[in-house]
Amino acid sequence: MLSSKIYNNNQTVIPSVIRKKHNLKPGDIIEWIEEDNGEIKIKFREKSKLRDIIGIINTKNPTNAVKLKKMTKDEIKKFKKGKGA
């Protein structure tokens, strides 16, 4: 069994054996999954890069990243339906 310490700033270190086995790099994401029985499972994945997600979403209207960032949840729903922004 491997273990690691939680430091004052709530950070921890992933043991090198695990990092090497799973080819983990800075910027990778750790997903924490709490099971119904209280057991914690973790999954590792790479951070999504722009080149990985380009073209996934199609909209009827041109997008403006600044406007989208400022939109409320209701405005985003309308935008997704092609009714605004």
Image: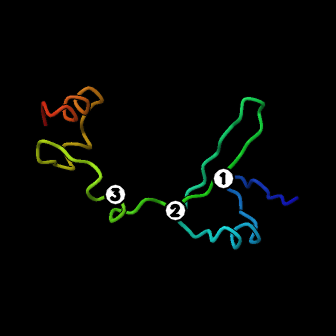
Of tags 1 and 2, the one toward the viewer is 2
Closer to the eye: label 3 or 1: 3
**Which residue was labeled with disc 2?**
46
Which residue corresponds to the image point at 33% horizontal and 65% vertical from the top-left?
51
Q: Residues within 10 Å of mark 3 (few under 14, many from 20)?
A: few
Instruction: Give the CA distance from mark 1 to mark 2.
Output: 23 Å
> Could you tell which of marks 3 and 1 lies nearer the N-terminus?
1
Element class at badge 2: loop
Residue named by callout 3: 53
Residue drawn at x 20%, y 48% is: 66
Residue type indicated by callout 1 = Asn
Q: As rendered, which of 16 and 11 lies closer to the eye?
A: 16
Q: Amino acid at mark 2?
A: Glu
Q: Which mark is residue 9?
A: 1
Q: Amino acid at mark 3?
A: Ile
* Residue contact at pointers 3 and 1, CB within 8 angstroms: no
The residue tagged with tag 3: helix, strand or loop?
A: helix
Q: Position of residue 52 (x, y in %)?
A: 36, 62
